[in-house]
Amino acid sequence: MGLRGQYVALPSPLNELQTQREFVSEEPCDYARILANCKARALGEILANNDEEIIEKVKKLQKTNLLDDDRRNVTLVLGSHTIVDCDNLVLDKPRNKEDAVQISNAN
């Protein structure tokens, strides 16, 4: 059984850096939850608006055609955001090698 061929993983179009700055003062658990929710909503809005570029990308990625008109489709959008909580300080994924070195040396 399983889910092979029944889902497609797509990156969210959300401007993460801007959103991270907006919620940086939140508690780490809340921060990760809020970012995951924002990512899911941003992608969900594009899917709900039937963005042709995204629909074509989904069709190319899926193993079975989940978007056939003769089927009733339910779309679930899951969002996630991973952080490191270091003594209540949120460490996001580094943007590049220099950012990683800076984050490593800050603590």
Image (tube, rainbow, N blue to C red):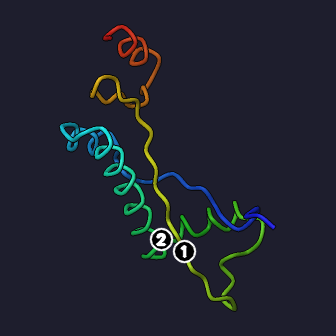
Q: Which residue is outermost to the top?
A: 105
The image shows residue 40 at horizontal and vertical percentages of: 42, 60
From what the image shows, is residue 92 above or below residue 74?
above
Identified by mark 2, the residue type is: Leu
From what the image shows, is residue 71 above or below residue 18?
below
Q: Which residue is outermost to the front?
A: 87
Q: Secondary structure at mark 1?
A: loop
From what the image shows, is residue 69 above or below residue 106?
below
Q: Which residue is mark 2?
A: 47
Left or right: 78 in relation to 99: right
Q: Residue at x 56, y 55 (%)?
A: 10
Q: Residue at x 22, y 43 (%)?
A: 23
Q: Residue at x 34, y 56 (%)?
A: 38
| Discs 2, 1 touching: Cβ within 8 Å | yes
Left or right: 91 in relation to 23: right
Picture quarter with the C terminus = top left
Picture quarter with the N terminus = bottom right
Q: Secondary structure at mark 2?
A: helix
Left or right: 58 in relation to 38: right
Q: Residues within 10 Å of mark 1 (few under 14, many from 20)?
A: few
Q: Earlier in the sequence, mark 2 or mark 1?
A: 2
The image shows residue 45 at horizontal and vertical percentages of: 39, 69
Identified by mark 1, the residue type is: Thr
Q: Which residue is outermost to the bottom?
A: 70
Q: Which residue is mark 1?
A: 75
